[in-house]
Amino acid sequence: MVRNLHYAPALAKYERITHMSFAGLSEDKIKSSGYVVDTLEAALWCFLTTANYHDCVLKAVNLGSDTDTVACVAGSIAGLYYGEIPEAWINTVRNKKFVDKVIEKFTSAILEEK
């Protein structure tokens, strides 16, 4: 049981995403701004209203406004759930060889720590 509710006013800002009707909201009710609450709502809404990674991220981008932030969060959620990023998208990453090296170095460092 949570006894210390000093953070309750902050949690109230996220109340909308806890309702079953949230996924049924129309697109015009979703804000795609850089504000953290709007970003989380938009990302979750995109995930809940699509059936695959591609459609989720594309929907997030098409919301407009702060598309890079919302698509990043939506893509992270969808990636965790669906497990695959479209190969065609991976192959179009700028400086892919450099990015691959950074990922490899990061992964190696994590594995060495175990």
Image (tube, rainbow, N blue to C red):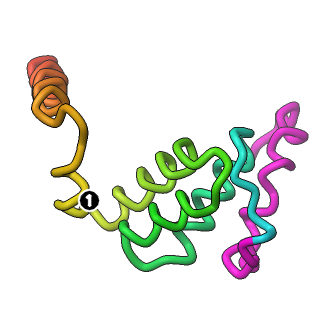
Mark 1 residue element: loop
Q: The residue under label 1 is which amino acid type?
A: Ile
x then y, percent, for residue 12? 86, 49
Direction from residue 12 to residue 105 in the image, left or right: left
**Residue at x 50%, y 52% (from the top left corner):** 71
Is residue 15 shown in magenta?
yes
Q: Which residue is mark 1?
A: 85
**Residue at x 87%, y 31% (from the top left corner):** 6
Task: Answer few, some or many: residues within 10 Å of disc 1's Cα (few below 14, many 20 plus, some between 14 and 19).
Answer: some
x then y, percent, for residue 113? 15, 18
- Residue 51 sits above or below residue 101 on the image: below
Q: How many marks?
A: 1
Is residue 10 shown in magenta?
yes
**Residue at x 16%, y 36% (from the top left corner):** 96
- Residue 47 sits above or below residue 32 on the image: below
User: Which corner quadrant holds the C terminus?
Assistant: top left
In-front residue for pair 73/34: 34
Please give the range of residues in magenta. 1-27
Instruction: Determine the image quadrant of residue 88.
Output: bottom left
x then y, percent, for residue 60? 55, 60
- Residue 113 sits above or below residue 88 on the image: above
Direction from residue 22 to residue 74 in the image, left or right: left
x then y, percent, for residue 44? 59, 61
In-front residue for pair 57/3: 57
- Residue 101 sits above or below residue 74 on the image: above
**Residue at x 58%, y 57% (from the top left corner):** 43
